Amino acid sequence: MRILCTNDDGIHAEGLEVLEEIARTLSDDVWVVAPEEDQSGAARALTLRDPVRIRVAGEKKFAVAGTPTDCAQMGASHILPKDGKGPDLILSGVNNGQNIAEDVTLSGTIAAAFQGMQMGIPSVALSLSRFSRDKCRWETPRAHAPAILKKIIEAGWPEDVVMNLNFPDRDPEDCGPVEITEQGFRDQVNLYAEERMDLRGRTYYWYGFEGKLSNPPEGTDLKAIYEGRISLTPLHLSLTHQDARVAMREIFS
């Protein structure tokens, strides 16, 4: 099995090293194609106005001057096929921070997986929750991800689905079991812009997340992560709200 690893935190991210280790428990044919710079929050952005440049960063390892979507696209359609064939599986992550609830629409980690899915390649996004400024608990995905991935790869999943795997901010031995969840939605806005001033007296803003916990219902990715369980959510790209669609059809019929 040929595996393509990518992320949105960049080619030098510690989570990418962890992902490589996880991938090598599944296969000895592991490739890395990741952004040259941190692309967190890039969502499904695609570089269309500038050239996409690729740098060889090591054996089977490439840095792309572009977005996570660029990386999945270039890796699967251009870089790996030069060695004979494209990837059989795309793993994206391990992200430094959870990708749950409405965050899934902002996440470059999940976007890379969606690009793989769009190309017909089974894809999994992996993220490690972080609710404090303490050191990330990378041992948690190291310990739990291989068995989870082996199980879902063996079972398979629909071609139009990306598997979104989130680990709680807990040590490996303190994690609850895997819960198959649905995407939640926070009951408050978590994103804010902090106003700052540079040394020339000009105002600028820096986005951040307040880290407030919401009050989610049972069965959601939010609830599972808050309570220390591993969340596995099958995601797809259909954003159509069916009830509203039916209502609008009646109005305009």
Image (spheres, rainbow, N blue to C red):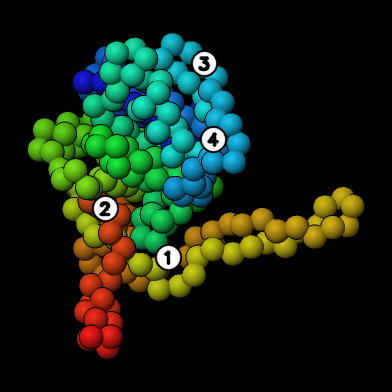
Kindly report which numbered mark, 1 or 4, lies closer to the viewer in this rendering.
4
Q: Quadrant of residue 124?
A: top left
Looking at marks 3 and 2 on the same chain, the residue that comes earlier in the sequence is marked by 3
Looking at the image, tell me whether mark 1 or mark 4 is earlier in sequence order. 4
How many marks do you count on the picture?
Answer: 4
Q: Is mark 3 on a helix, strand or loop?
A: strand
Tell me how far mark 2 sits from mark 1, CA to CA.
Answer: 22 Å
Q: How far apart are marks 4 and 3 (CA)?
A: 14 Å
Q: As displayed, is residue 30 above or below residue 122?
A: above
Q: Distance between the residues labelled 3 and 1?
A: 41 Å
* Mark 3 closeness class: few <14, some 14–19, many ≥20 residues within 10 Å: few
Q: Name the residue under label 4.
A: 66
Residue contact at pointers 1 and 4, CB within 8 angstroms:
no
Q: Where is residue 89 in the image (x, y as percent from the top left)?
A: 26, 30
Mark 4 or mark 3, which has the lower sequence index?
Answer: 3
Decide: few, some or many residues near mark 1? Use Cα within 10 Å; few <14, some 14-19, many ≥20: some
Query: Circle 1 is placed at which residue position?
Result: 213
Question: Which residue position holds label 2?
Answer: 235
Residue extending farthest to the front is 253
- The spot of residue 207 in percent (x, y) is 61, 57
